[in-house]
Amino acid sequence: MPPTDRTLPLSASQQALWLAHRLAPESAAYTIVLPVRLRGPLDSDALSAAVRTVAARHPLLRSVFAEGDGEGADGEPYRTVLDGPDQDALTVRELPDATDAHLHALVRECAQEAFRIDVEPPFRVTLLRRDAQDAVLVIATHHIVSDYASHHLILRELLTLHREFADGSAPDPVSAGAGPDIHAEQVTAERRLLSSARGARGATYWRQVRVGALPAELPTDRPRPATQGFRGATHELPLPTSTVERLTKAARSLDVTPFAFLLGVFQATLYRHSGQPDALVGCPMSTRGALGAGRRTEAAVGYFVNTVPVRGSFRPGDRMSDAVLAAQRQLVQGLAHAGHPGALLAAAPGRRTPPFRTAVTLIATDRTEPRLGPVRADGEGDARPYEGLTVARIGVPQQEGQFDLMLRIEQSGDTLDAVFSYDTDLFDAGTVERFAQRYARLLDRATDDPGAEIEAIALVDRSDLAELLAMGSGTV
């Protein structure tokens, strides 16, 4: 598979992911998967043609990454766009006797399979087929070429093209073939931004956010290793319907978004655990359209994400509403500088610590096509009709160990799930479970009474407190 002459620079965020890959090339911490159960008439030849067409349309999906000479002189990483795959990116596994539990176990294996992004395109599609009418489709990429929106775009295109190839209405080679490299245009725009007056204002803003503040840190169960291992696990916390209803009402009363409310409570929970009065958490923001490409990025596969620091500043007597309003204010102000890469904060000379070790993000699963509902790990969501098939998302833990602790809020309609992914080199499962329970406790109190004083909220209920006191007195 000889490379073309197209060697392209990476965005600052992609460079950070390349470094993470170099530190732990066998880790699957940055493998993203979207597994779906498909029921209906499946044509493997049509699906194979669909996979090849999607790879042709989106140059990032047929790129490899390296560092060295040429565009990547002086060790700077770069990517090379390949002419096309020399083998089918679709793998079909015939599993006529597989149980649902077996299929879900194989999905987990796909999620734990690392990419060798220096020698192979970071895109693979696997069909676990039980019979001609029942299969699981697993789309996997490395984060360096995709984000959450990209995966749903890939799924949508695959299922549409599958139907078109199956019924003979597939697009002609010109319209089905290679599309423009929108991500390369974004990288060029980012570099142009960094050398502009607007870029200087963005750099100044993010420096001001960070000055005097350290990364928020949850006290660890073990010493931090010298090198991050990118190993992790996940704890899920479904939020009760009553909590979601109160959250909506409380956020409206403060004129903030529900996400800002959830972020502020997360920062307050970290403060109660660590005692850090000024601490930073990371917040991924979408850069689709932020650098001038406009609506063109909506149909492009790529890593259009910028994780930026949000500061939590706490003083005695602060109330939950103070934390929530501060989070909202910073999110709004940060949007004006979302195109300025937060990864440069970590790369600045003299910086020995990352700008953040914890992060919070929101994923709305019901705002993309096909609309996939909520799902728990190892479970299946509701089946929805799409392009002649029924489609149901399969839940699988993934992207574990990227941070010390990452809270992913998954929203589908009126349902909210808090998913905590954590570094198992640092934390035991029980530690993260207790933190999640206390987050839920502060969230309940904040939605009931946003004016509640942060330090006055009990982190344990009366029964837990009684047990702790009994343990301290030696009576249990």
Image (tube, rainbow, N blue to C red):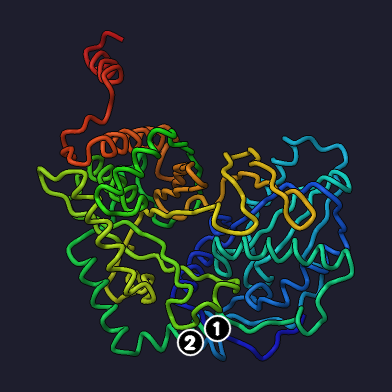
Q: Which residue is mark 2?
A: 188
Task: Judge whether 59 appears above or below 156 on screen.
Answer: below
Secondary structure state at the residue bearing disc 2: helix
Please state the horizontal and vertical placement of residue 37, each as a whole percent of the image.
73, 47
Q: CA distance from mark 2 to mark 1?
A: 6 Å
Give the residue at x 30% y 48%. Answer: 251
Q: Which residue is mark 1?
A: 184
Q: Which amino acid, mark 2?
A: Thr
Q: Nearer the viewer, residue 330 or 306?
A: 330
Residue 88: image quadrant is: bottom right
Q: Which amino acid, mark 1?
A: Ala
Image position of 2 (left or right of 208)? right
Task: Judge whether 452 appears above or below 129 on screen.
Answer: above
Marks 1 and 2: in contact by CB < 8 Å?
yes
Count of labels shown? 2
Is the C terminus in the top left, top right, bottom left or bottom right quadrant?
top left
Image position of 324 (left or right of 85)? left
Mark 1 crowdedness (10 Å alpha carbons): few <14, some 14-19, many ≥20 = some
Image position of 408 (left or right of 82)? left
Mark 2 crowdedness (10 Å alpha carbons): few <14, some 14-19, many ≥20 = some
Please state the horizontal and vertical placement of residue 9, each as a whole percent of the image.
52, 84
